[in-house]
Each structure stands twice: as C-alpha cells, then as structure tokens.
Image: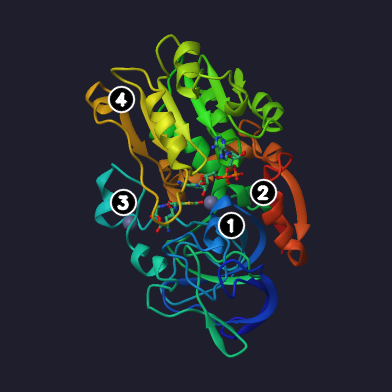
C-alpha cells in the first residue's frame, strides 16, 4: 500500500447537525513530514459532538471528525524520523514539535507548529489527503480518527509500547489525559486540597482520578445527571452534589463554600457551560482558590464574574489536553497503564463497530455512558 492511495471506510460529516454517514473514502499517501496511520480504535469525545452540532467556530464541512485515536503506522513521508511503519501510535490533537517558541518555553504544551493549518482543516501544506465522491474532505483537529486510514503531521502522533492495547490507549489521545493532566499538571493539586469537579464525563472523572492520586482531602463532584453519582464514587469522589436537588434558596456556590469551610482550593469546569464556569470560580477559596476551565463553550458564549472575585485572590485558568506534552509524556503514561498504576479500562463503558458510530453520540448524553470506543 505504501505510496498508493488507499480506499477505506470513514464516517463522514457532510454538514453540521446531520448524522455521520459511512462512506468509501480515498486517502492519499503521506507527503513530506506526514504519516499515514491505520486507525484501529477511536474514542468519541464530547468535542466531536460539539463540532458536529455546528457550535464550533472552527467547525468546517465536509470533514472527517474524531481526535481520540490509536493505530499503527502504515507508511511515512519524506523526512519522517520519529516513527516507522508498524509502530503503535496515539494521535495528538495538541501537537509537540519540540522546536517552536511555545514548545521551548517550558511554560505550555500548546505547540503552534501546525495549529493554524489544523484549525482550517488542512495539513501544514494547506491541502487535505481525503477525497470522497470527487470532493475534498477536511481533516479535523489534525487527527481525523473516524477513518480507517488517516494522514497526520509527524508532530501530531507519538509511538508507544506496542504491547499496550490500542482499544485502551486511544483514550489517552484526549479524555483521560485531559482530565488527569488538568489535576496533576495545570492545577498541580497537593495533598489535603479540597477539590470540586463540575461534570462527571470522561474528562471530569479523570480529574477526580488525578486529584485522588495527589491525596486531595475532599473531592466533590457536581452533576445534574443523578446517574453519575455512582461513577463519581467509583473514581474516588468523596461527595456528590446534584445542583437540581438543592433546597430552595441554596445555590451550588453556597453549598460548596459551606462544605469546604470557605471554598475550594481547586475547581474544574468539565461541562462547557459558561454559567457553571462562573459558579466554579466563585466556589473557590478567597485568597488562593484556582478554577480551571476545561469545558469547551459554544460560539458566542462568554464568561462573566465580578472582578472583585479576582481582586480577592481567586484565579481563573484554562487547560488544553491537561497541559500534557504528548510526545514527551504519553509513553510514560502508557508504561504506567501497563504496570497497573494508571487506570483507563474503567472509563470505557461502550464498544461498537464503525457502522454504529452515530449511536455513540446519543450515548454521550446518557448517564450510563462514560466513553464509547469504536472498533474501526
Ligand atoms: P461528557 O458529555 O461525557 O460529560 C459532561 C458531563 O457534564 C455530563 O455528565 C453532564 O451530565 C454534565 N453536565 C452538563 N451540564 C451540567 C451542568 N450544568 N452542571 C453540572 N454538570 C453538567 O463530556 P466530556 O467528553 O467529559 O467533555 C467535557 C467537556 O470538556 C466538554 O465541553 C468537552 O468539549 C471538553 N473537553 C475539553 C478538552 C480540553 O482539552 N480543554 C478536552 C476534552 C474535552
Ligand atoms: N475550536 C474551538 C475551540 C475548541 C477547543 O477549545 N479545543 C480544546 C480541545 S477539546 C478536546 O476535546 C483545545 O485544546 N483547545 C486548544 C487549541 O489550541 O485548540 C473554538 O472555539 O474555536
Ligand atoms: Zn476530546
Ligand atoms: Zn512546537
């Protein structure tokens, strides 16, 4: 197959708000500094649903969505030295080139090498490798994992231990790493800290896992879906609050401030709801509490609070991919998964074949689903 166009199945997003359709797509060979990957498994993240819904200002159609993928390198383009055919890889929507100002700063994981073209749905040379019915399909978040084969920039993937199962490692491409990193890297939660996590999806539960590992005192999970309570405890929450069940006149902020003797050391938004983001900030302890925004809000949405909240020491922060540098740090996390000191399995509640991928989007809204893994 090397050097030739591959025809394979992909779930194509033709337009916003419509279900994906299974199509035969043509995937061109990788050009210089590109890698063609046989995608074996992909998770379905809330962000895929957000982009498909039409709420993403960077959403562009027709495209191949998916950004939580694992697979095997099929072939490499000229100049690729970091991976070789046969390598087991995880796709990275947060690239890591190790050379740009951002990568070298030591202050952020937000590599900018391919970010501008990635946001426009193309590879760094400005073109796409996908074609279907004579039309070009845009790529998504530099990954496009909802295709049996995909082409990505060589800075947008990492080779990991080939003995680690790809139906598990795919979740390190987004949800699990994002939440775990937000707690352990971005917030850097310490022993004894009180933590509140809004939204008990894959991301929120991975925050809980990170906070537990650090020895947090209280880990309070807040979700409007009561079915998430059992999940929260399973991952290490000490308390669960359903804000729709609070007594008349008690706000979620009042409740959290009361439970933590003045407010939380760290709070996390894992919902993407801007009202929740405000509550998360205001539930922080005066003088030092930090609130980390992870959730992605729809186009046009903005956050608000009284500046006095910040004047009095609360800090508003954000986190992308948990502050984790994919190429540098994921191999170690995969090792920890292998030796049993890092959880992934419990996040996977549903598995299905590619032809059933649309049902993964409806499952996302149910209380019994944390992550669906699609077998490509
Ligand atoms: P998910 O849909 O699996 O989970 C979201 C949870 O939030 C659900 O349990 C839902 O019941 C709960 N929720 C919704 N509204 C709520 C409210 N008003 N109050 C309390 N709980 C509420 O989603 P996910 O895949 O875990 O992703 C979570 C968010 O993080 C999404 O916005 C997603 O786009 C974003 N995300 C961001 C990054 C990043 O790097 N910053 C990475 C992955 C996902
Ligand atoms: N395209 C959106 C923003 C989407 C967004 O915030 N994406 C997160 C990752 S979500 C993964 O599930 C992120 O990492 N952002 C940093 C970046 O560089 O994209 C918009 O509003 O335009
Ligand atoms: Zn994601
Ligand atoms: Zn870089």
The outermost residue toward the front is 248
Where residue 332 appears, x then y in whole percent? 52, 41
Numbered tag placed on residue 103 in the rendering: 3
Earlier in the chain: of badge 1 and badge 2, it is: 1
Circle 4 residue: 314
Disc 3, ligand 4: is the CB inside 8 Å?
A: yes
Q: Quadrant of the rendered structure where residue 358 is?
A: bottom right
Q: What residue appears at the point 51 percent right and 19 percent down from the top-left corner?
A: 249
Q: Are marks 1 and 2 in contact (CB under 8 Å)?
A: yes
Q: What residue appears at the point 50 percent right and 42 percent down from the top-left corner?
A: 178
Asked whether, in this view, residue 144 is left or right of residue 321, the answer is right
Disc 1, ligand 1: is the CB inside 8 Å?
A: yes
Earlier in the chain: of badge 1 and badge 3, it is: 1
Earlier in the chain: of badge 4 and badge 1, it is: 1
Crowding around mark 4 (Cα neighbors within 10 Å: few <14, some 14 to 19, many 20+) is: many
Circle 2 residue: 364
Q: Where does the N terminus fall, quadrant-wise?
A: bottom right
Q: How far, Cα to Cα, is label 4 from label 3?
A: 28 Å
> Which quadrant contains ligand 2?
bottom left
* Helix, strand or loop under label 2: loop
Q: Where does the C terminus fall, quadrant-wise?
A: bottom right
* Helix, strand or loop under label 3: helix
Q: How far, Cα to Cα, is label 1 from label 2?
A: 9 Å
């Amino acid at each position: 197959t090397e050097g030739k166009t591959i025809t394979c199945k992909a779930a194509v997003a033709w337009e916003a708000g419509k279900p994906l359709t299974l199509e035969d797509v043509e995937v061109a060979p990788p050009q210089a500094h590109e890698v063609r990957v046989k995608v074996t498994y992909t998770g379905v993240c809330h962000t895929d649903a957000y982009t498909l819904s039409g709420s993403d200002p960077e959403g562009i159609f027709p495209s191949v969505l998916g950004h939580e993928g694992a697979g095997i390198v099929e072939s490499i383009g000229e100049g690729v030295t970091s991976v070789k055919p046969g390598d087991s890889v995880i796709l990275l929507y947060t690239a890591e080139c190790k050379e740009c100002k951002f990568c070298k700063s030591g202050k952020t994981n937000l590599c900018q090498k391919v970010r501008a073209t990635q946001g426009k749905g193309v590879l760094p040379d400005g073109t796409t490798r996908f074609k279907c019915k004579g039309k070009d399909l845009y790529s998504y978040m530099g990954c496009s994992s909802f295709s049996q084969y995909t082409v990505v920039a060589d800075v947008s993937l990492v080779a990991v231990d080939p003995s680690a199962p790809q139906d598990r490692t795919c979740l390190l491409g987004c949800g699990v790493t994002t939440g775990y990193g937000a707690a352990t890297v971005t917030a850097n939660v310490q022993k004894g800290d009180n933590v509140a996590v809004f939204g008990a999806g894959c991301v929120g539960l991975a925050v809980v896992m990170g906070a537990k590992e650090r020895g947090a005192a209280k880990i309070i999970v807040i979700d409007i879906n009561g079915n998430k309570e059992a999940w929260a405890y399973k991952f290490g929450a000490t308390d669960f609050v359903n804000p729709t069940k609070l007594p008349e006149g008690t706000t979620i902020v009042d409740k959290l401030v009361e439970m933590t003797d003045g407010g939380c050391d760290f709070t996390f938004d894992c919902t993407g709801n801007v009202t929740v983001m405000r509550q998360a900030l205001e539930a922080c302890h005066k003088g030092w509490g930090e609130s980390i925004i992870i959730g992605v809000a729809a186009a046009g949405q903005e956050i608000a609070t009284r500046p006095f909240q910040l004047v009095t020491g609360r800090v508003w922060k954000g986190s992308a991919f948990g502050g984790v540098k994919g190429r540098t740090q994921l191999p170690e996390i995969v090792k920890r998964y292998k030796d049993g000191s890092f959880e992934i399995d419990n996040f996977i509640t549903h598995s299905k074949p590619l032809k059933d991928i649309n049902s993964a989007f409806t499952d996302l809204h149910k209380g019994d689903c944390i992550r669906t893994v699609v077998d490509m």
